[in-house]
Image (cartoon, grey):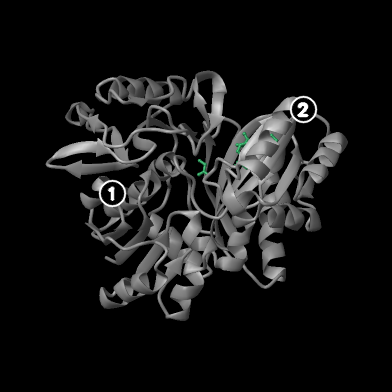
């Protein structure tokens, strides 16, 4: 039994709480959490940016372990701050979190350690971007250097699309300071795959693979989002490919970060493009994915607490055989997401779900016993099964029982 504090408030954090609550009589706290995590433990209304208040809470409540869900507190150095106060916390420190917080740092790092990636050029004004487009050719990817909640990437197929993207970066400043500089990249065409490696600074273990559905609408149409659904495992996850990914991407990354004096402890999320069975890094994230966590955790082979403990003790690899079968998550989002959307939209019908379907809250709040939306991505409906078809059938049967008139979801996850 441990006293655990989870930092964050989305579907990923609800899934972390669900996983931990299911494996032992852990005492779970979530800051700030959501109505879903409130059912599994205690929500604590503390701001993720207020590290001192969180450390005080951890100390006064004798928290054994803090787990960080989102990237922003990691990039802001929450792990360094907790460790400086002798509080046990899981995630990379500020320096290692640069792998996600600066796309240009990550690209430069991968270049240095010969980790396979698309051709790219760092740019900070229009002239540089046009020169890069000239060099790399169309289509081309413009990516904000800093954190942009998964939305700072624009794929351009024509010069007019480049011009429109440049207006967003440099005139509208849609990405704020995160978009002051950018990585202009060769557009890779292949199949995407997300790989989650549990790392102890030196060694690692792949605890799951997944496919994220990033576009807003069916058929991979519409704008990029934080993720509209996911399946696990990835259809591409053969033993051979995972071995290749381990040897050419994960291990060199751990070796490189260690050489630089910032060993990587935490979950390393490699977002990959697979082309003719060869992996290339689209991006690194320094945390679990959302909504991938929601499908990876139900298939985990060992208790999550033990895995995290092993990583913190420097004892990875561990014996972790991912379960057979498949998991699928469908995100119910507010109409308009990832653009403008309303909040406070009512949701009913949650009592009609099958017992073995898991409902994770993402952007919800409760008012007088009524569930309302409070964000763009609102709920995640998750089903598991012996195979993906069974899981997909069940998840969509259950989505249809939820009444959320102000919402929408993709109908083709897992298809
Ligand atoms: P990211 O936030 O870096 O994962 O980018 C979001 C999405 O944009 C990715 O999941 C890809 O679909 C796409 N993308 C980003 N970079 C590239 C690239 N260099 N080539 C092709 N697609 C990309
Ligand atoms: N679903 C993508 C991410 O978590 O970054």
**In terms of image quadrants, where is residue 296?**
top left
> Measuring 70% from the left and 28% from the top, which residue is drawn there?
161
Residue 240 visible, this orientation: no
Q: Position of residue 412 (x, y in %)?
A: 47, 20
Is residue 265 visible to the viewer in this orientation of the structure? yes
Percent across and percent down for residue 207 are: 51, 49
Q: Is residue 313 above or below residue 101?
A: below
Q: Nearer the viewer, residue 145 or 289?
A: 145
Q: Quadrant of ligand 1?
A: top right
Which residue position holds label 2? 159
Which sits in the foreground, 386 or 96? 96
- Mark 2 neighbour density, 10 Å: few (under 14) some (14–19) many (20 or more): some
Position of residue 120 measured from the top left corner of the image (x, y, whole percent): 78, 44
What crowding class fits label 1: few (fewer than 14 Cα within 10 Å), some (14-19), or many (20 or more)?
A: many
Q: Earlier in the sequence, mark 1 or mark 2?
A: 1
Q: Which residue is mark 1?
A: 34
State the residue at coordinates (72%, 63%).
256
Q: Quadrant of the N terminus?
A: bottom left
Query: Closest to the observer: 6 or 277?
Result: 6
Q: Which numbered tag is attached to residue 327?
A: none
Q: CA distance from mark 1 to mark 2?
A: 43 Å
């Amino acid at each position: 039994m441990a006293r655990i504090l989870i930092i964050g408030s989305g579907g990923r954090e609800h899934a972390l709480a669900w996983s931990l609550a299911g494996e032992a009589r852990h005492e779970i706290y979530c800051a700030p959490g959501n109505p879903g995590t409130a059912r599994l433990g205690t929500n604590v209304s503390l701001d993720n940016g207020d590290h001192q208040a969180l450390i005080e809470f951890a100390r006064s409540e004798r928290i054994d372990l803090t787990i960080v869900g989102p990237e922003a507190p990691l990039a802001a150095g929450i792990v360094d701050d907790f460790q400086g106060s002798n509080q046990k916390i899981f995630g990379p420190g500020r320096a290692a979190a640069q792998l996600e917080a600066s796309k240009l740092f990550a690209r430069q790092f991968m270049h240095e350690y010969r980790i396979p990636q698309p051709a790219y050029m760092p740019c900070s004004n229009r002239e540089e971007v046009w020169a890069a487009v000239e060099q790399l050719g169309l289509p081309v990817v413009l990516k904000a250097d800093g954190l942009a909640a998964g939305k700072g990437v624009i794929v351009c197929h024509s010069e007019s699309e480049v011009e429109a993207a440049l207006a967003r970066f440099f005139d509208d400043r849609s990405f704020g300071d995160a978009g002051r500089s950018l990585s202009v990249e060769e557009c890779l065409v292949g199949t995407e795959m997300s790989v989650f490696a549990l790392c102890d600074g030196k060694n690692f273990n792949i605890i799951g693979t997944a496919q994220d559905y990033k576009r807003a609408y069916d058929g991979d149409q519409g704008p990029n989002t934080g993720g509209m659904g996911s399946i696990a495992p990835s259809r591409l996850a053969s033993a051979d490919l995972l071995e290749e990914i381990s040897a050419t991407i994960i291990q060199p990354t751990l070796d490189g970060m260690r050489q630089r004096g910032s060993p990587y402890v935490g979950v390393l999320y490699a977002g990959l493009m697979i082309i003719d069975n060869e992996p290339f890094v689209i991006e690194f994230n320094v945390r679990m994915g959302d909504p991938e966590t929601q499908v990876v955790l139900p298939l985990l082979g060992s208790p999550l607490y033990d895995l995290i403990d092993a990583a913190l003790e420097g004892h990875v690899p561990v014996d972790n055989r991912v379960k057979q079968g498949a998991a699928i998550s469908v995100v119910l989002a507010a109409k308009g997401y990832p653009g403008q959307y309303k909040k406070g939209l009512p949701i009913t019908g949650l009592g009609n779900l099958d017992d073995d379907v898991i409902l994770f809250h993402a952007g919800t709040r409760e008012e007088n016993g009524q569930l309302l939306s409070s964000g763009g991505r609102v709920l995640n409906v998750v089903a598991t099964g012996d195979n993906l078809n069974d899981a997909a059938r069940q998840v969509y049967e259950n989505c249809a029982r939820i009444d959320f008139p102000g919402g929408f979801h993709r109908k083709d996850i897992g298809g």
